[in-house]
Amino acid sequence: NAGVTQTPKFRVLKTGQSMTLLCAQDMNHEYMYWYRQDPGMGLRLIHYSVGEGTTAKGEVPDGYNVSRLKKQNFLLGLESAAPSQTSVYFCASSYYSGRSGANVLTFGAGSRLTVL
Amino acid sequence: GDSVTQMEGPVTLSEEAFLTINCTYTATGYPSLFWYVQYPGEGLQLLLKATKADDKGSNKGFEATYRKETTSFHLEKGSVQVSDSAVYFCALSDPGGSYIPTFGRGTSLIVHP
């Protein structure tokens, strides 16, 4: 199984351009997440989804939009890129193990975005 | 809300040294606790977990014990190798809360030959 696949792996944008990062998982997971990783800041949650057709805001949602039209895909969009969005973006997914279970995430390899 | 605090790095050790990375947490319920590892150029992957008090998670020579009385989940390894050089993240998920994991800021470990 491929697990969680992110495309593209690298992208350079100019300020004001738009783009979409694609995340695909083949584990039939209900939950999917988008994080950004910046030096000294750890992982910060941008948006997440608890099922097909649903999305919710995380810790740092401004400037990003997401969609989950199919259970296996979670798209992250930047409508008007800014230099502050230069970062490494990670997608993750997990299955719902119930209120007594542990929520274990499976991560993709990351997408490095540079905004000039 | 829930939070995770882990020691700042980098932690620099010689091969075969003993490793401890401290992690403490704040949660309203009874969280599950995790350590994830990120090798250079890769995504995070689960290293070990514990779901209730006094549980010990272990994997690849690493161990961590869920200490409810001190709200801690410190990561230890008796003898580190160069290949253990990576960034380590402590995390929790609170089944009684939002269920969405909360991560610490990560601790970089550098092991020299």
Image (tube, coloured by chain):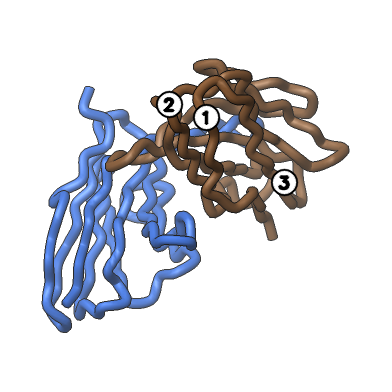
Chain colours: A blue, B brown
Q: Answer yes or no: do the residues labelled 3 and 2 have beta carbons within 8 Å?
A: no
Residue A2 image position (x, y, % from top left): 21, 28
* For residue A91, side relative to residue B103 (left or right): left
* Among the two numbered marks 3 and 2 on one chain, the one whose residue lies closer to the N terminus: 3
Q: Disc 1 designates what residue?
A: B14
User: The residue tagged with tag 2: helix, strand or loop?
Assistant: loop
Kind of residue at badge 1 = Ser
Kind of residue at badge 2 = Pro
* For residue A105, side relative to residue A14 (left or right): right
Q: In the rendered structure, the residue with mark 2 lies on which chain?
A: B
Q: CA distance from mark 2 to mark 1?
A: 6 Å
Q: Disc 3 designates what residue?
A: B24
Eyeballing the image, is B58 above or below B108? above
Q: Disc 2 designates what residue?
A: B113
User: The residue tagged with tag 3: helix, strand or loop?
Assistant: strand
Kind of residue at badge 3 = Thr
Q: Observer-nearest residue: A79 or A51?
A: A79
Q: Observer-nearest residue: B17 or B76?
A: B17
Residue A94 image position (x, y, % from top left): 42, 37
Q: In the rendered structure, the residue with mark 1 lies on which chain?
A: B
Q: Residue at x 59, y 25 (%)?
A: B17
Q: In the image, are marks 2 and 1 on the same chain?
A: yes
